[in-house]
Image (tube, grey):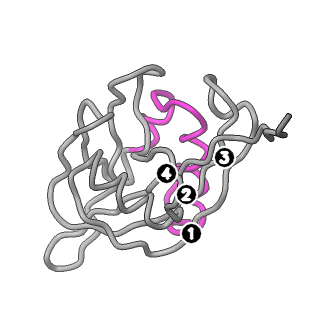
Amino acid sequence: MAFTPKTPYLATDGIVEIYNNTEKLLGIVLIQRKYPPIGLALPGGFVNIGESVEQAVIREMKEEISLDVTIQSLLGVYSDPKRDIRFHTASVVYVCKAYGTPLGADDAKEAKVFILEDLQKELKKLVFDHSTIIKDYLKKYHPTLSI
């Protein structure tokens, strides 16, 4: 009998910063999830077999928000066994840069740019541990914001 290890699912999420043509940061993209758990979320998804996490975040951003992104940095790895109510998921979270208007597709019912100063009122609407991830992002990259 072959041994089949049980491991967490591997996912990747993107904090996609949207810039205009003068390089002004307009905000970050959040999606409205099409499938349970329903709510606001960072765009992202599962890593496919044979795919790196970097390739996965670029593919998932194209699939869910219809934008090409450039990875800017690694924010962190989020692996609390309780972060996803469906099953144990570990997510590698990248900060990405993009231009244009996001359009919800695939698992995203809709996609919208939220200016950083308005994120506080959206945090309670976020699913998974995405409010923690956004707070970590703001603390690291925008420490002067009082969120």
Picture quadrant of residue 4: top right
Mark carried by residue 88: none
Bounds of the magenta span?
Answer: 119-147
Mark carried by residue 74: 1
Q: Nearer the viewer, residue 60 or 72?
A: 60
Name the main secondary structure of what is drawn in magenta: helix
> Could you tell me which residue is drawn at 84 percent across and 40 percent down?
3
Q: CA distance from mark 1 to mark 3?
A: 14 Å
Q: Amino acid at mark 2?
A: Val
Picture quadrant of residue 107: top left
> For the residues carrying marks 2 and 4, which lies nearer the camera in this image?
4
Name which of mark 1 and mark 3 comes first in the sequence: 1
The residue identified by callout 4 is: 48
> Could you tell me which residue is drawn at 72 percent across and 30 percent down?
82
The residue identified by callout 2 is: 93
Position in image of residue 131 (x %, y %) = 55, 40
Would residue 35 be found to the left or right of residue 128 on screen? left
Q: Secondary structure at mark 2?
A: strand
Would residue 130 be found to the left or right of residue 69 on screen? right
Position in image of residue 47 (x %, y %) = 51, 51
Q: CA distance from mark 2 to mark 4?
A: 16 Å
Which quadrant, please, contains the N terminus? top right
Does the residue at mark 2 contact the one at mark 1 (Cβ under 8 Å)? Answer: yes
Q: Amino acid at mark 3?
A: Ala
